[in-house]
Amino acid sequence: MTNEQSRRLALKALSALKRKYGTPVARVTRPPLEELLVGILTSAMSERKAHAALDALAAGFVDWNEVRISDVNEIAGVLGDIEEALHLARCVRYVLQRVYDIHNEMSLGFLQDKSSREAVRLVAQIERFPESAIARATLLAMEHESIPLTPGLVSVCRRLGLIEDANDHRLDKHLPRQKLYELHWLATRHAMTVCLAEEPKCEMCVLRTDCRAGRAKGPVSRSTGGAGRAAKAGKTSR
Ligand code: SF4
């Protein structure tokens, strides 16, 4: 595939995923570490509520270091009465601990001049980590030009034929930073709902006609188009 063909495929996949899931919104106004935390929270609540929850955390503790050493139940209590509060609290605390272990400071400044691979390593061991939180911190808050190749993104993009493996950074050359973030958010969401690691649901995938792995499964059935239309009708907006 030529560079131009790859670029077009990336843009086409991005459009199809936006039609299905809506355009991701990220109101980035905070330091990178806080944007990483907001990114974690937006996996379970709206952008507005995530900012409000982070404000509540900031008000409820002396600083991020105190959050780091606090009990997860205490952190979850500040996040409010939501189903995923305990999981989000664990993610927040684990991230803060990882940052402290690596940097000995509550800041992502150590990633400023590092490759996106270092950012992926920072969160790699965190169970059920919402992958696009790290893309939010690096691409949007730190203005990195390189997309973090996290597992869900790599899985979807490999199947599509956009990259070959977790060291392939060709997407960086095809899309500007904002679109890299959108692709990251949408592809990782697709990885959680349709393009599942073990058994992708190709029969209901809006990317199937353009997907290398999907096409290898045989002709697209009429139900694929139906799934696409149904998904469009019921898409979420954030
Ligand atoms: S067609 Fe299948 S393999 Fe390709 S992106 Fe869709 S679900 Fe994943």
Image: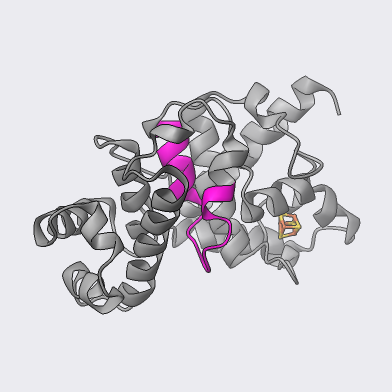
Q: Quadrant of residue 145?
A: top right
Residue at x 24%, y 61% (from the top left corner): 67
Number of labels in the image equals 0
In front: 163, or 122? 122
Q: Quadrant of residue 49?
A: bottom left
**Which SS does the magenta portion mostly show?**
helix
Image quarter (top left, top right, bottom left or bottom right) of the N terminus: top right
- Check if residue 15 falls in the magenta segment: no
Residue 238 in sight in this render: no
Residue at x 75%, y 39% (from the top left corner): 167
Q: Quadrant of residue 183?
A: top right
Residue 39 pos. (x, y %) = 37, 51
Residue at x 47%, y 47% (from the top left corner): 102
Where is ligand 1, by quadrant? bottom right
Image height check: is 235 above or below 81?
above
Image height check: is 205 above or below 115?
below
Image height check: is 23 above or below 66?
above
Residue 41 in sight in this render: yes
Q: How is the image coloured?
A: one colour
Please provide the residue range marked out in magenta: 121-140
Residue at x 83%, y 54% (from the top left corner): 213
Q: Is residue 20 left or right of residue 234?
A: right
In front: 54, or 8? 54
Residue 230 pos. (x, y %) = 53, 63
- Check if residue 128 falls in the magenta segment: yes
Q: Is residue 81 left or right of residue 238?
A: left
Residue 125 pos. (x, y %) = 57, 62
